[in-house]
Image (spheres, rainbow, N blue to C red):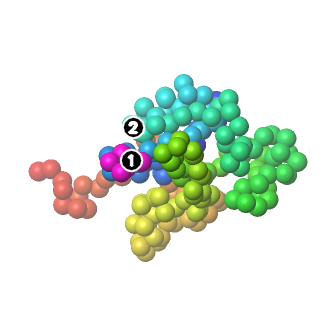
Amino acid sequence: MMELEQEWQCEGCSLATDHINGLLPHLEHHDLSYVAVSRAPIEEIEVVRKRMGWEFCWVSSYKSDFNYDFHVSFRPDEVKAGKTIYNFRDKKIGPETYTLSRHSVFYKNAKGEIFHTYGAFGRGDEQFMGILAFYDVLPKGREEYGPSHSIPDWGKVHDRYESNGKDETACGCATP
């Protein structure tokens, strides 16, 4: 979602994480933790986390190889050479793209051993985004008609929409 000194947030990652706050009590009562990982330094992450009102744990992998080990971040020399692997296959990454999305599940047993039990890349993580089920039943669907043919064509970071999106007269909820 965020790289070092990145002045924008990924719309898709932001949309996915917008789903988390309401789930936190349910996850916590089932011995589950949700953690987001970004390459930006923690100071930059905290500014965005607070602005967005997100309550989940969001950590920085800035000074580690975590993202590289899971093939979601790419070093400039790998991108330039066209030697990037994403979703278990070679993938050409654009010149400004150094990080892509992934959801992972880890399990820690009684001995403290940690196992990676699940991973999904790109559109494979849509199952975690309930809003897509609503869009998919609409007459116009997700309206992915723009240049990306994906979330950036119709979705924005929730505090970046031009209006609040509410038409109070449409549902009869206007105040007298």
Image coordinates of residue 122 in percent, x first then y, are: 61, 58
Residue at the outermost front position: 111
The residue positioned 78% from the left and 40% from the top of the image is: 75
Q: Amino acid at mark 1?
A: Asp
Viewer-side residue, 131 vs 103: 103
Residue 126 falls left or right of residue 29: right
Q: Which mark is residue 31?
A: 1
- Magenta stretch, overall SS: loop
**Image height of 142 relative to 85, above or below:** below
The residue positioned 42% from the left and 31% from the top of the image is: 50
**Image height of 88 relative to 158, above or below:** below
Q: Amino acid at mark 2?
A: Glu
Q: In this picture, which residue range is highlighted in magenta?
A: 27-32
Viewer-side residue, 134 vs 101: 101
- As helix, strand or loop, the secondary structure at mark 2 comes to loop
Query: Which of the 4 image quarters holds residue 78?
Result: top right
Q: Is residue 31 visible?
A: yes
Q: Rounded to the nearest whole Å, what is the CA distance between mark 2 and mark 1?
A: 17 Å
Q: Is residue 22 visible?
A: no
Q: Which mark is residue 55?
A: 2
Q: Quadrant of the N terminus?
A: top right
Image coordinates of residue 150 in percent, x first then y, are: 59, 60
Residue 164 falls left or right of residue 47: left
The verdict on residue 150 being magenta is: no
Residue at the outermost left position: 176
The residue positioned 60% from the left and 28% from the top of the image is: 41
Image coordinates of residue 74 in percent, x first then y, are: 75, 44
**Image height of 175 relative to 129, above or below:** above
N-term-proximal mark, 2 vs 1 = 1
